[in-house]
């Protein structure tokens, strides 16, 4: 089995639209979303290697120093699948973007480290 990193993306505009919803509508969608996310986890529990977590504020470190930045990364998880397509199909219709204000999930294979790197 191969491992794949899934990153959950959301734009500031999507979050602003979510915050603009009436509170009762937002609360209902949060409850529905959490239930659907739990169902997704149960359906794929054998493939989930690391549930991951939501992501906080970002700092960029480069040759010129450290700076605060914004990006679209919202959360991450790691799954196992036979193929890249199989891993991607796990996230079709995911509550992150079908109920919550997230925009997409991107899935990439976790490749082996080159020999001698990081040892």
Image: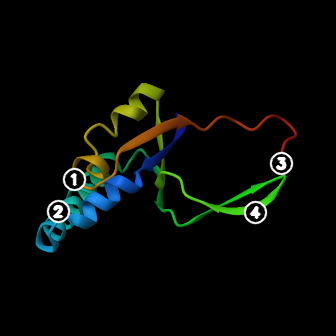
**Earlier sequence position, callout 1 versus callout 4:** 4
Going 48% across and 40% down the picture, which residue do you hit? 80
Give x and y (percent) for residue 26. Answer: 18, 67
Disc 2: which residue: 29
Q: CA distance from mark 4 to mark 2?
A: 37 Å
Q: Pointers 1 and 2 in contact (CB under 8 A)?
A: yes
Q: Residues within 10 Å of mark 2 (few under 14, many from 20)?
A: some
Disc on res. 99: 1
Horizontal relation, residue 86 to residue 118: left or right? left
Comparing labels 1 and 4, the label whose residue is closer to the camera: 4
Horizontal relation, residue 12 to residue 5: left or right? left
Comparing labels 4 and 3, the label whose residue is closer to the camera: 4
- Between 82 and 62, the residue placed more toward the observer is 62
Disc 3: which residue: 118
How are the residues colored? rainbow
Comparing labels 1 and 3, the label whose residue is closer to the camera: 1
Q: Pointers 4 and 3 in contact (CB under 8 A)?
A: no
Disc 4: which residue: 66
- In what element is the residue under mark 4? strand
């Amino acid at each position: 089995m191969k491992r794949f990193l899934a990153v959950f993306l959301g734009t500031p505009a999507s979050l602003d639209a979510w915050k603009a919803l009436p509170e009762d509508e937002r609360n209902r969608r949060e409850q529905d979303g959490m239930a659907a996310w739990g169902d997704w986890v149960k359906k794929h529990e054998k493939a989930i290697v690391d549930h991951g977590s939501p992501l906080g504020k970002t700092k960029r470190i480069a040759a010129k120093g450290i700076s605060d930045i914004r990006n679209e990364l919202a959360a991450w998880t790691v799954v196992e699948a036979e193929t890249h397509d199989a891993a991607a199909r796990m996230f079709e219709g995911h509550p992150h973007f079908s109920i919550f204000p997230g925009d997409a999930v991107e899935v990439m294979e976790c490749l082996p480290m080159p020999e001698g790197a990081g040892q």
